[in-house]
Image: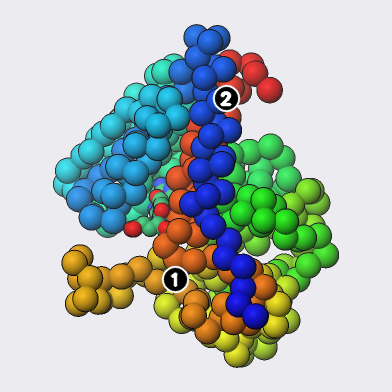
Amino acid sequence: MSAKIIDGKQIAADIREELKAEVAGLKEKGIVPGLGVILVGADPASQSYVSAKEKACENIGIFSDDNRLPAETSQEELLALVERMNNDPKINGILVQLPLPKHIDEAAVLLAIDPDKDVDGFHPMSVGKMMVGEEAFLPCTPHGVVQMLMRSGVETSGAHVVVVGRSNIVGKPVANMLLQKKEGANATVTLCHTRTKDLGHHTRQADIIIAASGWPNTITADMVKEGAVVIDVGVNRVEDASRERGYRLVGDVDFEAVKEKASMITPVPGGVGPMTITMLLFNTVESAKRANGID
Ligand SMILES: Nc1nc2c(c(=O)[nH]1)N[C@@H](CN(C=O)c1ccc(C(=O)N[C@@H](CCC(=O)O)C(=O)O)cc1)CN2
């Protein structure tokens, strides 16, 4: 039987409606959440993600401070802008779109962000707090994955989750979040990567597979247990002359074949992607509440 499609667009829209109502309530108290947005360079994918984030802010009533800087921007100039936003009370969250140009030390920039405004959840302080189970801003894509599982009624407690990919943005944090001792987690987690021997041996044991390798067709049908839940975090461009833009988007999972074996599956596009932007909005509202002493 074909899998139930987990509709990321719909779940994201539901959360955005909840946030819109929360932002309206904050406005009545004179509070307008603000997001400082920084994009260095003109990478087309990054430009479209940043524009989508700003549009999403506008739609729910978050103020955004747009800063598009040329690719030649120096690290010092970028750090000065981050510092200005750290000290600006109108800014509750700072988003530095990644990747940054090669001449800029990404780790140094992320470290410069005030952890209280780290709505991307990439600062080592946020990562450390998440790891030990303290309250912290959770990175947006992994947080989106956990929300999708919870809102789709997927039981993670005691389930065997196999994560494929060990990036700092997705693989490592999602593995960590799912093994925490809390609601929507409590899973047994296996973290696989490019050096894992016989990947299929691990994925076939999974109740839930989270594919975040960055390569199309990493997960094929023979690697999936009948009835497993499959979450595809990949966003890969593959050439497609039949499309106006010359490419189409695919995930890391062989969707057509795997959907015949899985019980639930996320599509690409329209799965995890829309959740990433939504959880950024969530963190920004959360930060505005914390800054104003609201629980
Ligand atoms: N500072 C950050 N940089 C990056 C992050 C991040 O969370 N913070 N994540 C990724 C890119 N990203 C957000 O920035 C992102 C990726 C994909 C989508 C998305 O909605 N994808 C759609 C398809 C969109 C399309 O048609 O191109 C989907 O999958 O349905 C949103 C955000 C790296 N950088």
Judging from the image, what secondary structure is the residue with disc 1 in? loop
- Name the side, left or right, on which 70 lies relative to 254: left
Q: Amino acid at mark 2?
A: Glu
Q: From the Cβ of disc 1, is ligand 1 less than 8 Å away? A: yes
Q: Amino acid at mark 1?
A: Gly
Looking at the image, residue 188 lies above or below residue 215: above
Viewer-nearest residue: 74 or 225:
225
Residue nearest the observer in this picture, 46 or 265 = 265
Disc 2 residue crowd, few under 14, some 14–19, many 20+, Cα 10 Å: some
Residue 222 to residue 81: above or below: below
Q: Secondary structure at mark 2?
A: helix
**Residue drawn at (57%, 25%), measured in percent from left and top?**
22
In the picture, the disc for residue 251 is 1
Crowd rating for badge 1 (residues with CA inside 10 Å; few <14, some 14–19, many 20+):
many
Residue that carries the numbered disc 2 in the rendered image: 22
Comparing 47 with 274, the one in front is: 274
User: Residue 8: horizontal and vertical position, in percent?
Assistant: 52, 55
Closer to the N terminus: mark 1 or mark 2? 2
- Which quadrant is the N terminus positioned in? bottom right
Q: Quadrant of residue 149?
A: bottom right
